């Protein structure tokens, strides 16, 4: 069955598979959102089912909560868990400092709250997510629906004075209606192409009334696990300054692929 996975899905899978090695019995774990994070949730479910791993999982979206329950993870809220040992999540882009753009799946608010409430954040990504400079992927900004057009205009005005290459913005849509987040907010995507100073931009955006949060994750991620389509994985730890490489065999009879 794994033979039918595309190279990109294999890359996401091996990154997820390697990242769950960091999860220990008894941990409270933040569960990210997106296709890579979904592999991670399935891998954790397998460990719970087959190896008796006992964890409490805090999902970052209703989608992830549903999947986590389906695979047998004990799901609790962040307020029940209070603080987390570890969060594992995907990203849309990451740079050499492990600054991230997140929110392609629209879950950036819960993702940032959960990752910030964790001792450690591990990002799992296929190799295509690594960039020299952030901004190729549109930066998601979550805004409240009230006065969203005014908020969008204020964001555009703010962009004039920051070091970015493009300044187009668009309201994220879901067919004919605005895309609505789990918190009932909208997302404005910023098409910046290159972000000269992500740290400054993250702070400035959050000063605008109506902006709830932006998708720049600065100084939050500790480790990135990068997957390749041929099974190679690279683990970079920004705090330790270490880089490790290994290969993960994709077993044709892997239980995870059985119902796909
Ligand atoms: C969701 C996210 C995701 O982590 C990000 O979009 C990456 O998704 P995928 O793993 O599907 O490429 O930030 O809000």
Image (spheres, grey):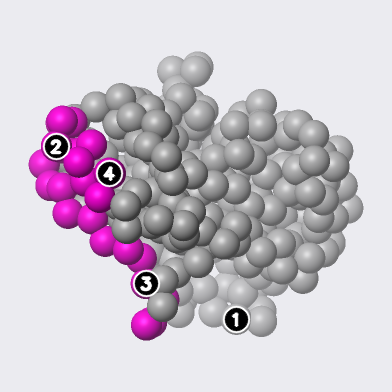
Where disc 4 sits, the SS reads: helix
Q: Mark 3 packing: few (<14 Cα in 10 Å), some, or many (20+)?
A: few
Q: Mark 4 packing: few (<14 Cα in 10 Å), some, or many (20+)?
A: some
Q: Which mark is residue 160?
A: 2
- Mark before the other along the chain sequence, 3 or 4: 4
Residue lying farthest to the top in this orientation: 240
Where disc 3 sits, the SS reads: strand
Q: Residue at x 50, y 49 (%)?
A: 108
Looking at the image, is mark 4 or mark 2 nearer the viewer?
Answer: 4
Q: Is residue 162 magenta?
A: yes
According to the picture, the residue beneath numbered tag 1 turns out to be 260
- Mark before the other along the chain sequence, 1 or 4: 4
- Mark before the other along the chain sequence, 1 or 2: 2
Q: Residue at x 45, y 79 (%)?
A: 4
- Mark before the other along the chain sequence, 1 or 3: 3
- Is ligand 1 less than 8 Å from the beta carbon at label 3? no
The Cα–Cα distance between marks 1 and 2, rounded to whole angstroms, is: 47 Å
Q: Is residue 28 toward the left or the right of residue 191 in the image?
A: right
Looking at the image, is mark 1 or mark 3 nearer the viewer?
Answer: 3
Q: Mark 2 packing: few (<14 Cα in 10 Å), some, or many (20+)?
A: few
According to the picture, the residue beneath numbered tag 4 turns out to be 154
99, above or below 259, in the image: above
Q: Is residue 20 toward the left or the right of residue 187 in the image?
A: right
Choose between 128 and 98: the one closer to the eye.
98
Give the percent coordinates (x, y) of residue 133.
Answer: 22, 36
- Is ligand 1 less than 8 Å from the beta carbon at label 1? no
């Amino acid at each position: 069955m794994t033979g039918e996975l595309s190279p990109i899905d294999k890359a996401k899978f091996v990154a997820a598979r390697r990242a769950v090695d960091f999860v220990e019995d008894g941990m409270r774990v933040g569960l990210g959102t997106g296709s890579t994070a979904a592999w991670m949730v399935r891998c954790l479910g397998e460990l719970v089912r087959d190896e008796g791993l006992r964890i409490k999982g805090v999902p970052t979206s209703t989608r992830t909560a549903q999947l986590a329950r389906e695979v047998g993870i004990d799901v609790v809220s962040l307020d029940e868990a209070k603080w987390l040992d570890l969060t594992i999540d995907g990203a849309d882009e990451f740079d050499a400092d492990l600054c991230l753009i997140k929110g392609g799946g629209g879950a950036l608010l819960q993702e940032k709250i959960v990752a910030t409430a964790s001792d450690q954040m591990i990002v799992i990504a296929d190799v295509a997510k690594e960039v020299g400079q952030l901004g190729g992927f549109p930066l998601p900004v979550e805004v409240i629906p009230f006065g969203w057009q005014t908020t969008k205009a204020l964001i555009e005005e703010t962009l004039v004075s920051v070091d970015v290459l493009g300044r187009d913005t668009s309201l994220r849509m879901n067919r004919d209606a605005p895309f609505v987040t789990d918190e009932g907010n909208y997302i404005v995507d910023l098409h910046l192409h290159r972000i000269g100073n992500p740290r400054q931009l993250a702070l400035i955006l959050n000063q605008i009334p109506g902006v709830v949060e932006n998708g720049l994750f600065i100084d939050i991620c500790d480790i990135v696990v990068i997957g390749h389509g041929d099974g190679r994985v690279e683990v970079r730890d920004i705090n330790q300054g270490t880089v490790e490489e290994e290969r993960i065999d994709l077993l044709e009879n892997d239980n995870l692929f059985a119902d796909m």
